[in-house]
Image: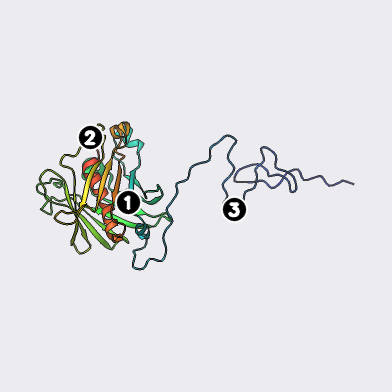
């Protein structure tokens, strides 16, 4: 007569491999320890816990606000950090730009990813047309920034003509235009008009007289936001110095944009679109192409 053998092993785990401890037995080194659903697997001894990006909590119950722009009701500053693309840094092959958009506390508000044609990126460089898809922490696209390619655009002196003015349209939700950013005629300093969906000018953005492009420009370069025709500053877009190595070998730029807390969220989204236009026009390296 045979006696029942004790259960030495628990159930085999197909995901991690190996057997768990038997029921009622303490887990031994080398055994897979069953985790609760949704829990992180245990880290090896001495390993550091991965740092997770903290996302801003989405405000609720804001009437009349386009979906996804509720975040903007709680901020008067956004920080835009372009991600370093290693392929571009080492080979000069122009890749799609990606950006993290954060609040002043460092919490991520949005993620922005460029969509553009590969041939246009290599041949037209920063002058290329693109769509910038801006998503929230649920991965839903909440803002879309569109720029058409214009072969002769960019000159400050002739920006009054439609064929020469760089511009973007801003949609939120995608498909519904909420604002426009258009390059305006100026002498030496860059100038832009910020318009609402009906093409009414709400703000002007005036840049520095001489834009410094290179690793030795160790200061912030400000584009001041004012009412039409000038007047008191209501905000600004700043291109921030990112350090000698990063400025020399990459296109990864840092920007900050400030605006009044009580500004319409649609205009805040339009000013965010202005950041991408300014980045492409003045701070994307031409020599990659």
Could you say which disc has been placed on residue 77 in the image? 1
Crowding near pointer 1: few (<14 within 10 Å), some, many (20+)?
Answer: many
At horizontal 56% and vertical 52% (from top left) the residue drawn is: 38
Q: CA distance from mark 2 to mark 1?
A: 32 Å
As helix, strand or loop, the secondary structure at mark 1 comes to strand
Sequence-first tag of 2 and 1? 1
At horizontal 34% and vertical 65% (from top left) the residue drawn is: 65
Q: Quadrant of residue 219?
A: top left
The residue closer to the viewer here, 99 or 4, is: 99
At horizontal 58% and vertical 45% (from top left) the residue drawn is: 41
Sequence-first tag of 3 and 2? 3
- From the top left corner, tell me how far across and down residue 245 is, in percent: 32, 31
Sequence-first tag of 3 and 1? 3
Q: Which residue is mark 3?
A: 37
Crowding near pointer 3: few (<14 within 10 Å), some, many (20+)?
Answer: few
As helix, strand or loop, the secondary structure at mark 2 comes to helix
Q: CA distance from mark 3 to mark 2?
A: 50 Å
As helix, strand or loop, the secondary structure at mark 3 comes to loop
Marks 3/2 in contact by CB < 8 Å: the verdict is no
Residue 72 drawn above or below residue 157: below
- From the top left corner, tell me how far across and down residue 134 is, in percent: 34, 53
Nearest to the eye among marks 3 and 1: give it. 1
- From the top left corner, tell me how far across and down residue 46 is, in percent: 57, 34
Residue 93 drawn above or below residue 37: above
Q: Which residue is mark 2?
A: 287
């Amino acid at each position: 007569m045979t006696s029942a053998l004790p259960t030495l092993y628990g159930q085999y785990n197909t995901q991690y491999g190996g057997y768990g401890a038997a029921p009622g037995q303490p887990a031994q080194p080398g055994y897979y320890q069953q985790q609760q659903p949704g829990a992180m697997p245990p880290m090896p001894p001495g390993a550091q816990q991965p740092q997770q990006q903290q996302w801003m909590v989405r405000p609720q119950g804001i009437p009349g606000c386009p979906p996804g722009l509720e975040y903007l009701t709680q901020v008067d500053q956004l920080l835009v950090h372009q991600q370093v693309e290693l392929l571009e840094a080492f080979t000069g092959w122009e890749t799609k730009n990606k950006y993290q958009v954060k609040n002043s506390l460092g919490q991520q508000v949005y993620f922005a990813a460029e969509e553009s044609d590969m041939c246009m990126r290599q041949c037209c460089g920063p002058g290329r047309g693109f769509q910038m898809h801006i998503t929230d922490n649920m991965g839903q696209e909440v803002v879309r920034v569109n720029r058409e390619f214009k072969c002769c655009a960019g000159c400050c002196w002739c920006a009054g003509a439609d064929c020469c003015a760089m511009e973007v349209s801003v949609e939120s939700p995608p498909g519904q235009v909420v604002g426009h950013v258009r390059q305006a005629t100026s002498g030496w300093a860059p100038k832009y008009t910020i318009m609402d969906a009906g093409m009414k000018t709400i703000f002007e953005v005036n840049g520095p007289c001489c834009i410094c492009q290179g690793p030795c420009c160790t200061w912030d370069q400000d584009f001041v936001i004012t009412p039409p025709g000038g007047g008191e500053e209501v905000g600004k877009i700043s291109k921030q110095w990112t350090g000698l190595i990063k400025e020399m070998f990459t296109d990864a730029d840092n920007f900050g944009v400030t605006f009044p807390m009580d500004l319409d969220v649609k205009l805040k989204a339009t000013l965010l679109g202005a950041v991408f236009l300014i980045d492409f026009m003045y701070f994307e390296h031409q020599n990659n192409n």
